[in-house]
Amino acid sequence: MYSLATGAVAVCATALITLAVSQDEEAGPVIVQETPAGYRDWRLISVAHEEGNLHSFAAVLGNDVAIKAYRERELPFPDGTIVAALHYHHVSSEENNKVFGREQSFVAGDPSNVQFMIKDSKKYASTGGWGFGHFQDGKPLTDKAKLKACFDCHARIKERDLIFTRYAP
């Protein structure tokens, strides 16, 4: 009886390991499914403005590990680095434009998404050491093809350890 139970456990464990490995190989980039705690209190790395279809402003924030690495110009970024990009649609500020006498002021409008890059060279080895997360209305994007596009785009700047954002002086 004991050997039958042991054998059943071994078969189940082997099946789970095989399933986990095959799912990981198929998944491509590892998906970040939870927002890091306290990210809204992190320090500013820089701001970004995207035109075209995105038409957004972003505040790019970093945890303490990210800020230290940016300030010390450390590349590659160390494990534990987390970068958050808070994206907002930009809209004209009628209130400000009245003061200026012409249309020239744009402010953050409705939030469009929050994105994260988390550095863990072992956990995210298949994606250059980075895990990618995209959240809309607090919910993680789980579309593997769209998240793979994050890595594919960031992989084009390997010399900067896949990070587009430079530290603002």
Image: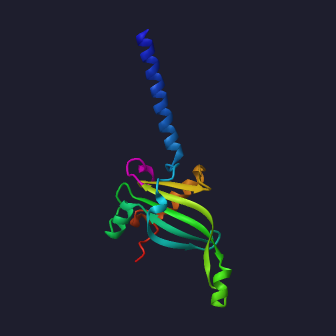
Give the left or right position of residue 13, taking residue 49 as reference.
left
**The N terminus appears in which quarter of the rendering?**
top left
Outermost residue, top direction? 1
Against 12, residue 156 (above or below) is below
Residue name at image x 66 percent, y 81 percent: 95
Residue name at image x 44 percent, y 50 percent: 126
Outermost residue, bottom direction? 101
**The C terminus appears in which quarter of the rendering?**
bottom left
Colour option used: rainbow
Q: Position of residue 109 (x, y in %)?
A: 63, 70
Residue name at image x 48 percent, y 30 percent: 16
Q: Position of residue 153 (x, y in %)?
A: 52, 62
Q: Nearer the viewer, residue 115 or 64?
A: 64
Q: Nearer the viewer, residue 97 or 127?
A: 97
120 falls in the magenta region: yes
Q: Position of residue 106 (x, y in %)?
A: 62, 78
Q: Position of residue 88 (x, y in %)?
A: 60, 67
Q: Nearer the viewer, residue 110 or 9?
A: 110
Against 153, residue 142 (above or below) is above
Against 51, residue 132 (above or below) is above
Against 27, residue 38 (above or below) is below
4 falls in the magenta region: no
Q: Which residues are magenta?
A: 119-127
